[in-house]
Image (tube, helix red, strand yellow):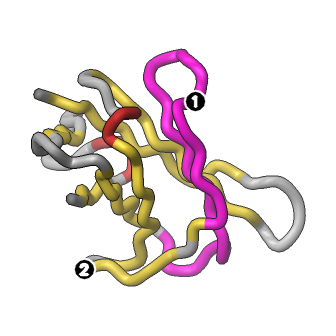
Amino acid sequence: YSFLLLPFGNVRGEGTVNQVKIPAGESVVEFHLQLIEETGPRRYQATLGKGDGPAAGTWTNLKPSAGRSGKIIRVPVPTKLLSPGAHRLTLAGYPSRGPAQIINTYDFRVVE
């Protein structure tokens, strides 16, 4: 099961946050993070957070792939990490040298 997330959480208008409803029985949800720029780093890292708490998960060495409306990063997230409420995926890119740099954030709300 997959969801396309746009940066900053806005989908249809001001203040609208991506709503994610996970079907019963799913063990993994694949989030497709839309990249704004067509050129960029070759490797990415995604970090899942909820509120001000510690990171719930980190995925490294992610590579862009073609999506319907441009390049995306695919992030497979176990549903056990997605309790109801607000979440944020932070996408960072690895430049040719040095540490990863934050590129975008993707806010979403898990609903029952």
Q: Position of residue 95 (x, y in %)?
A: 77, 67
- Amino acid carrying mark 2 in the image: Arg
* Residue span colored magenta: 37-61
Q: Residue furthest top?
A: 52
**Which residue is under mark 1?**
55
Looking at the rendering, which quadrant does residue 75 occupy? bottom left
28 or 103, nearer to the observer: 28
20 magenta-colored: no
Relative horizontal placement of residue 22, taking residue 101 as reference (left or right) = left
The image shows a total of numbered marks equal to 2
Which residue appears at 42% of the width and 65% of the height? 74
Which residue appears at 44% of the width and 24% of the height? 50
36 or 3, nearer to the observer: 3
- Residue 68's disc number: 2
- Amino acid carrying mark 1 in the image: Ala
Q: Which quadrant of the rendered structure holds the N terminus?
A: bottom left
Q: Position of residue 54 (x, y in %)?
A: 59, 22
Which residue appears at 66% of the width and 76% of the height? 42
Which residue appears at 41% of the width and 77% of the height? 71
Q: Residue furthest right?
A: 97
38 or 26, nearer to the observer: 26
Sort mark 1 into few (<14), some (14-19) or many (20+) by Cα contacts within 10 Å: few
Q: Position of residue 91 (x, y in %)?
A: 55, 52
Estimate the spatial distance between the alpha carbons at disc 1 and disc 2, rounded to whole Å: 29 Å
Q: Is residue 2 above or below residue 40?
A: above
**Circle 2 — which element?**
loop
Label 1 vs 2, first from the N-terminus: 1
